[in-house]
Amino acid sequence: MSTDIPIEELFEHAKISTTIQTAVRTPGMESWSGSKISKEPTKIYDINGELLFLDFSVRSQMRGAGVTGYVRVGSKRNIGSPIISYELGPKRWDFKAAVGKLTPLFNKKFPKLKVEDVKLVCYSYPKLGVMFKAVDATGSATHHIFDVASLAPVPENKGKAVEGFFAWSYLDSLTDQMKSARSRQYEEASKSLKEIPEKERASMMKAEVFGKYVSKYIGTIFPLIQTKLLQYCTHYNYDETRSHHCFVLQGQQVDDYCAVATCQMILCYYRYYYSQDQIAPALNYTQGSGCPSDQSAGYEKLTCNHLDATFDNTPTWAEAKTQIDALHPFKSGIQGHARACAGYSKVMLTNSLYIYDPWPWNADFKLAGSIKWENWNSITHTNYVFTKLTCP
């Protein structure tokens, strides 16, 4: 496994960071207590062929409980902070099953091509796909990508500033300046890790399951924690029988409906109910091309201007935090993809957003999408839509 960072070092980052997050009861990760992290990660490659991410699964030790989530880390220093995200719950796709279904279809469609390699790739962060590397009779190689969940062929980006369904390289998108800045972020994270007393680090690494480790060190972290999730009622607690979340995940019902599904989630929070097909025209959606970067006018149109939607293509962490503190969800835009944000967390030096991602697609819409804590520094933030209710 080719990586700029030793796997043992990445595993240490994953386990210790998750130990801390579980111990301080980061919202959504409370159920990880009593779970164990796997030492054998799932490899995720960039479409340029380089190793990009490693996903360490977190599995409950209770009989029949299964996977409670995943810790994603970057495989290279120039990706930045080692922890990319904590995904909550099991994955709704299966790479091996996808390969099994796609292979005969690929061979039938391209009978003159010989498959040389098949990889799990991140074709448009954070969306994953199956990439076939194939050669023709002359030895010329071609690459073909299919979404790992919907199995649809993924087209290349033609340079349009849209949020839809196409492939681009995460690593190739990083400029030299970005790589330099992100390498410094990794060094800072490693320095922070080493500042934990050696005895404490050893105890965290030795602990079999999360939630069993308590120390004076964890106690010193509590003043450095800030978290907030959007909720209407103060009695909210993840394990209360009658508790409820006031923000609901909606999966994208079409591969390039990410912006549409994101708008649906945000409008639902404000109690405006529309189907995704009703929302799409208001966002200037075009079949096969997705939605343009600025969708703010559509948010206002769908709410008869009762909602003030502001487009921001240079969002900051402070702006995102202020939005959530004011109880306003927003659209988090990244290159080629849209998600909804309904919370934030600041644990020590790490700032994270609570992301409701409409990907992956699933035939059962109730099982589509995913929820995660995503490190602010792990991605390039592009086009946001901040929302708030207009006052008379």
Image (cartoon, helix red, strand yellow):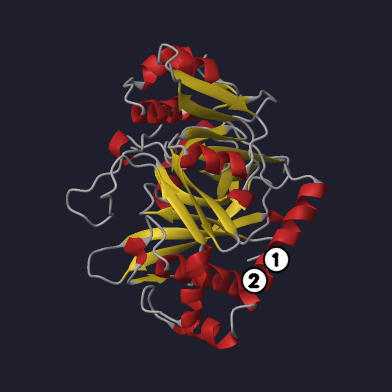
Question: Which quadrant of the view contains residue 311?
Answer: top right
Residue 356 disc label = none
Name the image quarter holding residue 267.
top left
- Quarter-of-image position of residue 332: top right
Which three-letter amino acid code belongs to the residue tagged 1? Glu
89, 100: nearer the viewer:
89
Residue 120: where, in percent of width, then height? Answer: 54, 50
Q: State the separation of the CA atoms marked 1 and 2.
A: 6 Å
Please identify the residue farthest to the front as the structure is shown.
392
Q: Residues within 10 Å of mark 1 (few under 14, many from 20)?
A: some
Q: Give the residue at mark 1.
A: 188
Is the C terminus in the top left, top right, bottom left or bottom right quadrant? top left
Asked whether the beta carbons under mark 1 and mark 2 sit within 8 Å of each other, the answer is yes
Q: How packed is label 2: few (under 14 Cα within 10 Å), some, or many (20 or more)? A: few
- For the residue labelled by badge 1, is the local secondary structure a helix, a strand or a loop? helix
Residue annotated with mark 2:
192
Front-most of residues 48 and 4: 4
Q: Position of residue 285 (x, y in %)?
A: 51, 16
Q: Is residue 346 visible?
A: yes
Residue farthest along the right direction in this orientation: 176
Q: Of the residues shown, which amino acid type is indicated by label 2?
A: Ser
Among all residues in the image, which is located at the extreme bottom? 199
On screen, residue 304 above or below 255: above
SS state under label 2: helix
103 vs 366, left or right, is right
Relative depth, front residue between 154 and 68: 68
Viewer-proximal residue among 66 and 19: 19
Task: Residue 300: give x, y in percent of width and height.
Answer: 47, 16
The answer to whether residue 253 is seen in the rendering is: no
- The percent coordinates of residue 356 (x first, y second) are 43, 41
Which quarter of the image is occupied by the N terminus?
A: bottom right
